[in-house]
Image: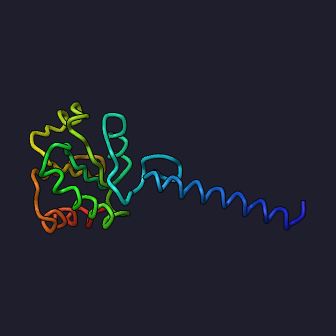
Amino acid sequence: MSSMDELAEIRQRKLETLLREIKGKEKGMSPRGELAGYHERPVPVGTGNFSEFISENELVIVDCWDPWCKPCLAIAPTIEALAREYAGRAAFGKLNVDEETSVAQHYGIMGIPTLLIFKGGQLVDRVVGNMPRARLEEKIKSYVGHV
């Protein structure tokens, strides 16, 4: 095999790897196809992936919500914007408490919206109710500084 053929083969493998990574990012997954890593959008979480999501990300904010909850719908654009702004420093999840009752019960979700904040896989804080973006961001910044 000539050096030109080897170079072409290496380029092809590299291109295939890059394409897999791009497709994985579009799906909100790591290049290995896992939930690990940070995302620019909140990731739907539930019984099947909740533990993995909070353990594989150093700082996680989980928005516990329900589609019929008007305050939940009001805060959703703020959560989306914060997920984009803090991508690479925090991972955001969305837990539909109506569909994932066992997870909601485990964390004692009594009112929505509730934001659960995990650091190093441990619940460290919770915010109940809709609050202004500035106050939410202040809370998140206090944990981002410690990542």
Q: Nearer the viewer, residue 81 or 48?
A: 81
Q: Nearer the viewer, residue 124 or 10?
A: 10
Q: Residue at x 13, y 37 (%)?
A: 108
Note whether 103 is above or below 25 in the view shown.
above
The reply, left or right, for residue 26 in relation to residue 15 is left
Image quadrant in which the N terminus is located: bottom right
Q: Residue at x 43, y 52 (%)?
A: 28
Q: Residue at x 12, y 52 (%)?
A: 71
Find residue 105 and report its image quarter.
top left
Q: Position of residue 44 (x, y in %)?
A: 33, 45
Find residue 9 and report its image quarter.
bottom right
The reply, left or right, for residue 124 in relation to residue 22 is left
The reply, left or right, for residue 112 in relation to residue 140 is left
Q: Position of residue 144 (x, y in %)?
A: 27, 64
Please, which residue is most extreme toward the top here? 102
The colour scheme used here is rainbow
Please, which residue is most extreme toward the right here? 1
Image quadrant in which the C terminus is located: bottom left
Q: Position of residue 41 (x, y in %)?
A: 34, 57
Note whether 63 is above or below 110 in the view shown.
below
Note whether 97 is above or below 123 in the view shown.
above
Q: Residue at x 42, y 54 (%)?
A: 37
Q: Position of residue 47 (x, y in %)?
A: 31, 34
Report how many numbered discs are placed on residues in the image. 0
